[in-house]
Amino acid sequence: MNKAIADFRSDNAGRVAPELITALATANNGTVLGYGGDPLTAQLQARFCELFETPVRVFPVPTGTAANALSLAAVCPSFGAVYCSPDAHIHTAEGNALGFFSGGARMVGVPGPHGKIHAQALERAIGTAGVGLANKPQPAAVNVVQSTDLGAVYGTDEVAAISEVAHAHGLKVHMDGARIANAIARLGCTPAQATWKCGVDILSFGITKNGGLLADAIVVFRPDVATEIGFHLRRAGAVWSKMRFASAQILAYVEDGLWLRLAGQANQVAAHIAARIAPLAGVGFSAPVDANVLFVEMAPHALTALQEEGILFQRRGPSLARFVCRWDTSTADADALVAAITRVSAMREHPLPGHLELHAQHRP
Amino acid sequence: MNKAIADFRSDNAGRVAPELITALATANNGTVLGYGGDPLTAQLQARFCELFETPVRVFPVPTGTAANALSLAAVCPSFGAVYCSPDAHIHTAEGNALGFFSGGARMVGVPGPHGKIHAQALERAIGTAGVGLANKPQPAAVNVVQSTDLGAVYGTDEVAAISEVAHAHGLKVHMDGARIANAIARLGCTPAQATWKCGVDILSFGITKNGGLLADAIVVFRPDVATEIGFHLRRAGAVWSKMRFASAQILAYVEDGLWLRLAGQANQVAAHIAARIAPLAGVGFSAPVDANVLFVEMAPHALTALQEEGILFQRRGPSLARFVCRWDTSTADADALVAAITRVSAMREHPLPGHLELHAQHRP
Amino acid sequence: MNKAIADFRSDNAGRVAPELITALATANNGTVLGYGGDPLTAQLQARFCELFETPVRVFPVPTGTAANALSLAAVCPSFGAVYCSPDAHIHTAEGNALGFFSGGARMVGVPGPHGKIHAQALERAIGTAGVGLANKPQPAAVNVVQSTDLGAVYGTDEVAAISEVAHAHGLKVHMDGARIANAIARLGCTPAQATWKCGVDILSFGITKNGGLLADAIVVFRPDVATEIGFHLRRAGAVWSKMRFASAQILAYVEDGLWLRLAGQANQVAAHIAARIAPLAGVGFSAPVDANVLFVEMAPHALTALQEEGILFQRRGPSLARFVCRWDTSTADADALVAAITRVSAMREHPLPGHLELHAQHRP
Amino acid sequence: MNKAIADFRSDNAGRVAPELITALATANNGTVLGYGGDPLTAQLQARFCELFETPVRVFPVPTGTAANALSLAAVCPSFGAVYCSPDAHIHTAEGNALGFFSGGARMVGVPGPHGKIHAQALERAIGTAGVGLANKPQPAAVNVVQSTDLGAVYGTDEVAAISEVAHAHGLKVHMDGARIANAIARLGCTPAQATWKCGVDILSFGITKNGGLLADAIVVFRPDVATEIGFHLRRAGAVWSKMRFASAQILAYVEDGLWLRLAGQANQVAAHIAARIAPLAGVGFSAPVDANVLFVEMAPHALTALQEEGILFQRRGPSLARFVCRWDTSTADADALVAAITRVSAMREHPLPGHLELHAQHRP
């Protein structure tokens, strides 16, 4: 491979928003109680109640996997089932975290396009689950990823429809918001509208992927949900003693809308790239580019050529590539990618011409 | 309570060494692979091999509880027993973390002075454990806290004696080094001498309590120990995607001996206080002041008066107080504490005079 | 529903072979050591080594679910994956037992016909599993159900091919032999040929479904497999203190080939029914009738009529029925079923004629 | 050792009451639904409601360990604490079963005489537990063994006092009734008085030790207790598919007071032995002989001589022996023991005379 000319591998490959590091330095003053008994963590609680326009409980945690697995374990018994997209991060990329934290809970795949699940499909899945039969995992929760692992964004009505089905059957609604900022930036709605107002009970509030440092958070929206999660977290080693430095990051992250600005930048770069490459022959999208991630279909030889040009990205198959735009992805990076795709998409495969059929239905 | 005049509540109440925050800013540059695939984490591996003078594997983790429970779960089966002091942090202050992470492992208390365990007591405990009996927890690991939860420091010969017993029976040796820097600073030995050279197999390398921010680490000393711990950690949500920012902290922490300087400062302040208050009537020590923590026995009314004066500390019983000195505990703080103890220890209890008998055997 | 005229609901609906109850009475004599320290359990060990023509360890357990989950948990770590048919009992009918006993292990479906898995499909699944990637469940074991949950019997070459793939990748081979007697009776091979000679490492030796009472067993074929399972079992409450009464049952079960005679009877009845109904129009088989279970496709109205006639069976879908023949299913029961199916398959649906297409490829 | 002349090793060393085996033969008739959907299991439910004079739910389970661990796991969260006597069976003889089934729950020892716990000691223990502190196991349940592992029987007022403390703090009361029949036979009270009328919420109803075969049971006394235990049990492989044969045993066991007659016989033999050996010099009791178990203190050389004479018993220490009387312990066995103890207690130790001090306070 040549020298890397632009990096689209992952949200986590990038930098931290400098405001968060500044906040750490500012918080580094005086003495406070540990494990969340400090003024900044109290301020974080108040700030999130304000941000979400409802009383919430917020718990900083180290990682998105911890946020997801501990959220779900707090609402799903060891004999329970969590409904999710087969493309959901908890299913494809978190090992056995859910089963481990819950003492055995299983995931049940629910179909839907682009990493989404459909409310009707959820209804059907619950209907055949064997509720009350002790030899079947009992429906307990549904996991909605916003934006999805394939780069799509749920409409709030879509989430509301899922929540309606879930709540009608006694399931809790967990949103994996690893990229919730990108979704909200896209939807142009309020954080409240994107979450509890469409039925979300508990949220993995992602920060790391959007300029964060070493903390994500769990947000609980109802007093009767996850009542014991504080015990789960501490026992899981997921509560820092120097919590003020986690809370300080998160406060800075939401200060003055920083989080939505960062996500908006990433979304904008992605949209820019999508608009430029959509007209190219031999370029398709396997999912709509709603947020900051592009799933692009191209001929295998073209993707290989792209790699050889020094574009860093995740190859998801012979003819499928994932490009992730970050808050700190520059216009130069974007232009480099567009130029490279333009070049390689025009290449003929040698010695044998390719016969690639592309799904082009999601051109933006 | 009056305004706080000095804070001796805990190591984690204090500030972060500014070098660590600077390191974060420095690391905030360019793009890298996530989850530990970055150059700083590679550098951390190399640096720790050098620091410990042997090939080691090092894993940054969010908290000391995660470090302890995941280390022990990696060397103890679900049907196993971990031998520890009744005063050990895993026993008194980490909830059910060990049982949770291990799938049921139990702790067995081994007596010894000041939070230590004795090699002979360990030998006896293993001898009556019922090795091979399926209805008994099977001896699997021993937990040694260095420095101990009561402020004492094991001699390397003491640790070696414990390790010899443990290894003779097939147990692994885990050192909870939440305050290992303080211990090494006291012992004046090398990190290697304090750990694997006296038989330690796996170490919780504490950083948080000694100027750290949001990361501790696990260090594995032998290739055949904890071979699967990488899978345990990721599955436990204890692996950051932006790992470079954890590794950067830890690199800065050990750079040029910073960690031992910080710990030495804390130890020195503790020794200073101990030397000043030891001569006072009505003041005793329930454990030797080997490192940065003082366990002081005084009359209940005197401790209450101390609290009322604005000295912040942990009251462990009517007549027992814990004072923790940090790297950033100032001489002024120390002098304020000495002055306050001097005042309150001279007070007579009203209306009834006290009849306190103190254990004064550990005057430094 | 009319009075039941014949019961084909399940293997477990039937009677116990009287020899097993007699054995209990015979064993009820004198005093012995508990938890397996008795002469009958020693005799069971010896008998199974003889039966399987190799040194084995045998552990009586209460249920098939305990046998499966504890076998798999003994060979699969908490971060591991168990490969199985989507129709496997562990996947469809044992709740979250595997995840519970293993601390989180997940099942990965491998396609194949009639409840089997294919060696090549297993190879492909392992190939894309992400071996060594900590965010993916690590391939650890494969589960083969013999005879399958859809009534088919693996050839020993088919099992051997699976085992070869599994062992090449370091996976252990678990056979769920809930109906292994039926499979061996069908194959006409030895117990050794059906198990370890084709690569099985650990076996759930089913008894309950074939005339058993309250015990099944785990059989371990290699000294280096499941070395700690004795501790797992006792800790799981799966070891009876009055073990002699479990061992006595199992000894009687295999005495003079009783188990294979019982299974042979059940198989014969199933074959008899299959041969009689196969020629009927409107009757098909969704899987080959290799053992004692028939999966029959008929028009919905015909199945409903069959239920109304008083035939007890499990309806697996509008047009799919499962009929299980037991060792104590009488010829009269079989004839009653054949007569009833003959009647209902000739019925026209009213008022609207049906348009059922049947898969008839498995006519015996 | 000479030939065994009498066996006092354990309750589980003995025979099954023949009525239970007869019941199995009687139940072996016709076909029924599995997993408890049979008429005998329905009859068992009704019979236990009658027996305990209140609506209960009863669940046959394979072993006492399964009964205890699953009962406690059903009322104690993974971050919880179970209070028990240090001599309790769950603490001394069930490996890590509680931690395994509960996902980490810990036991906290509460002092008391003879395997009992004291209500006041429980009050104190809960008072210092750190309720609400996430780094401490949260008080969730108390375990009362009736009769105790040291052979004593709680008065119903003693149990009521414990329950009052437990319920006042929100803990559930679990009775380990492995020998509850012996306790009730001793107390002369009703099963209701021995259990829920003195506050027991959930009961391990022991059968095995008192003439049972392969089943014990869990009895739940309140509708709001252990509401999900049915799911826990099935998932744990503790629910037999041929449940009718477990239910038949238990029905026979309580038919016409059989269980209390069997226990009464065992108690009577124990009392007979105690009365005969109490007057002997050099013989003491470390606990009152309230039920069917004697804890006898004698000189080490005398106990060794007793073993050499062919008396089988459990030696709990150099000078402590446990003798268990069973329902099928004959008068001849008892007389053989008395005669042997009489002989060996009169022996002088050679060459050095012993200097044994015995606790003789519990002479019956």
Image: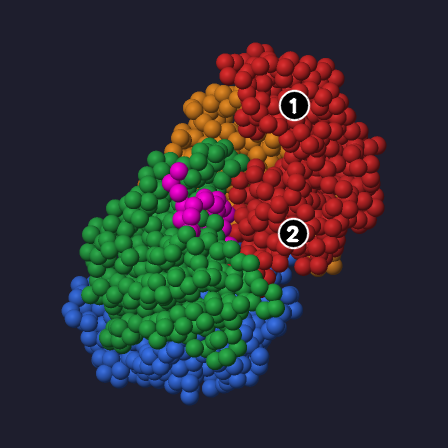
Chain colours: A orange, B red, C blue, D green
Q: Amino acid at mark 2?
A: Leu
Q: Which mark is residue C77?
A: none
- Which corner quadrant of the image does residue D24 belong to? bottom left
Q: Which mark is residue B283?
A: 1
Q: Which residue is mark 2?
A: B122
- The residue lying toward the viewer, choosing from A271 and D114, is D114
Q: Which residues are magenta?
A: D96-120
The answer to whether B253 is drawn above or below residue D307 in the figure is: above
- The residue lying toward the viewer, choosing from B353 and B143, is B353
Residue drawn at x 81%, y 44% is B193
> How busy is the neighbourhood of tag 2: few (under 14 within 10 Å), some, or many (20 plus)?
many
Residue drawn at x 52%, y 63% is D299
- State yes or no: discs 1 and 2 in contact (Cβ < 8 Å): no
Tell me residue C287's x, y (percent).
40, 73
- The residue lying toward the viewer, choosing from B159 and A309, is B159
Q: Amino acid at mark 1?
A: Val
